[in-house]
Amino acid sequence: MSVKTEKARTFQSGLTRQATMLAAAPALVAGLLIWSGLYYLDKFPGASHFGLLLVMSVLPLLFGVAILVVMVLTLMKNTGKRVTITKDSITYEHGPERFAVRWEMLAFSAPPAGKKMMRAISISDGANYARIEELFFPDFDALLQMVTAGKQRKLSAIEL
């Protein structure tokens, strides 16, 4: 018994070089804040120096940890996404969220022409919505080209 397999191309999100470069400065600042907070933690003992301890140690520690938490949460939210393109449809998966939509029913928003950084594709089936960020998709240009071609029903010109 033979099973007909449909050609498909899958795009997986992950950490790109551009995302790593953009994360370097906040990570460095967070590291310096945490180091500064730990360094001054024992420099102001006693209740008479509580104000200085708060400003020089506790606040930098809190801000540094908050920056790192936001960075990790952003990474967790944007990695693990998978977009699969076939001749007939596009499928989006991220954790328990999954939807597939035929090209005729797809609501699609491409990045503005001429925009070079922080580009994103928005796709929807009418009930579900997904935003696909360039920062977290290593092959974003190929994905954009395929989604645009699929929406224009010219996907047969592109090899899956």
Image: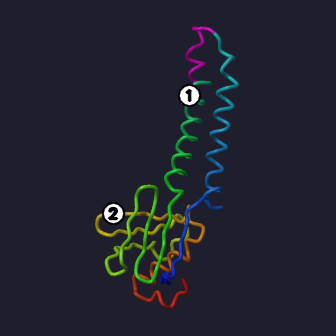
Residue type at numbered disc 1? Leu
**Quarter of the image holding residue 44?**
top right
* Residue 55 vs residue 21, the one in the foreground: 21
Residue 123 vs residue 47: left or right? left
Residue occupying the point 67% across, 43% down = 28
- The quadrant the C terminus occupies is bottom right
* Foreground label between 2 and 1: 2
Q: Which residues are magenta?
A: 46-56
Residue type at numbered disc 2? Asn
Residue occupying the point 33% across, 63% down = 128
Residue 128 vs residue 150: left or right? left
Q: Earlier in the sequence, mark 2 or mark 1?
A: 1
- The secondary structure type at the circle numbered 2 is loop
Examine the rendered structure and indicate whether residue 58 appears above or below residue 128: above
Residue at which label 2 appears: 128
Examine the rendered structure and indicate whether residue 133 appears above or below residue 60: below
Secondary structure predominantly adopted by residues drawn in magenta: helix
Q: How many marks?
A: 2
Residue 14 x %, y %: 59, 60
* Residue 27 vs residue 86, the one in the foreground: 86
Residue at which label 1 appears: 59
The 10 Å Cα crowd at callout 2, few under 14, some 14 to 19, many 20 or more, is: few
Examine the rendered structure and indicate whether residue 12 appears above or below residue 55: below
**Quarter of the image holding residue 122?**
bottom left
Residue occupying the point 59% across, 18% down = 52
- What whole-number distance in Å separates the C-alpha atoms at marks 2 and 1? 40 Å
- The secondary structure type at the circle numbered 1 is helix
Residue occupying the point 54% across, 40% down = 69
Residue 55 magenta-highlighted = yes
Residue 99 magenta-highlighted = no
Residue 123, labelled with which disc?
none
Residue 19 x %, y %: 60, 58
